[in-house]
Image (spheres, rainbow, N blue to C red):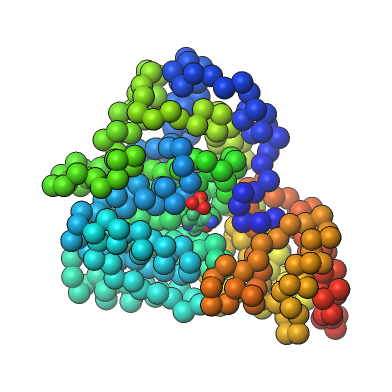
Amino acid sequence: MIPGPIEFEPAVMQSVGQPTTSHVAPDFIASFGHALEMMREVWLAPAGQPFIIAGTGTLAMDMAGSNLIEPGESALVISTGYFGDRYAELLKRYGANVTLLKAATGDTVKVSEVEAELKKKQYKLMTFTHVDTSTAVMVDPAPLGLLGEKYGVLTVLDGVCSVAGEVIRQDDWKIDVVLTASQKAVGVPPGLALMVVSEKALAVWRERKTPVGNYYCDWSHWLPVMKAYEERRPSYFGTPAVNLVTGLETSLAIILKEGMDSRFARHQRLARVFRTAMKEMGLKMIPLSEEISAGTLSAPYYPEGVQGASFMKAIATSDVILAGGLLPEIKDKYFRVGHMGSVTNGDILATVSAIENALKSAGYSSGK
Ligand code: PMP
């Protein structure tokens, strides 16, 4: 129950475990092409250009950043935790002038504050994290996408902890890049960087005056490869992660069979149930309100008097694996529970029970 890598469906593991074929074998070309097509349905981005690249979520962030920023251009980064801060650092490497709008711990940045910042100068790019995995705070991407459209700013959504778990309607919300990694709600072992890019962002990228400062990430290498796979033609730039792509085809089919709206609703319901159980036990959550609490993971503070180390030691003897804190300033004060992908009612129940027992052995009694 950690926020990635999650537990994967047996059918996905079976696909990943098939003998590795050539990256230009006809059946692999068909799988790759099919996975690209299904990404548009999962991202709700019928007009977008999907990319499947070997790498992690940070590579997906790097790819969007390096292709869309030229040295000296301005980027606005909205940070709700550790991964927002990472995006600010990353964009500086490509020469961006970065303005960081940082939320207080557990809160989001108000849409009106973002708009006030966009009025001050012309930004090229704005990034925001849908669910920051360090805080479990969820940002509503819809108004931010529409602000980007209004002010002529490209928008990038870090959806590493949200795609295929939280509601995302990329086309409706006019978000130019929605990126993620395979190991979270998409449900495939770590190793794939995934993103869907709008035609508008590609048009801006085509007008670049300077070459992309990252050789591997340059879309001019990958765009023809993605197009070729969709047209069921062989192609090559870098060897794809063949087994993971086959697993991705299986996982995306499982996701679409559940249906996006049902999948979003299941995540919201299980998260709500989990938070209710934590609150009943007297635990406070990092996100300051229900409206900004994620469906994919939760981050409860340890109750008064409970030491993280003794709680984690007790959890280690249960059947449930949880994650510790990540945000440096409060790292030892909270823990994290992922509930995304194939998670069930039974998983939530077992987790709540393990937490209750671990709290008890760490000396805590909720008095209920
Ligand atoms: N953004 C968010 C919101 C994440 O949760 C993570 C990983 N936990 C990343 C980016 C980076 O992804 P990766 O670890 O796959 O590089």
Residue found at the far left of this picture: 209
Q: For this rendering, which residue is in front, 342 or 99?
A: 99
**Would you place residue 245 above or below residue 308 in this image?**
above
Q: For this rendering, which residue is in front, 239 or 184?
A: 239
**Would you place residue 319 above or below residue 227 in this image?**
below
Point 42% across, 47% down: residue = 59
Q: Based on the displayed image, in which of its 4 quarters is residue 215 positioned?
A: top left
Point 44% across, 18% down: residue = 24
Q: Based on the displayed image, in which of its 4 quarters is residue 352 positioned?
A: bottom right
Q: Image check: 104 left or right of 15?
A: left
Q: Position of residue 364 (x, y in %)?
A: 82, 80
Q: For this rendering, which residue is in front, 65 or 232?
A: 65
Q: Is residue 44 visible?
A: no
Residue found at the far top of this picture: 26
The quadrant of the image that shows the C terminus is: bottom right
Q: Position of residue 9 (x, y in %)?
A: 68, 38
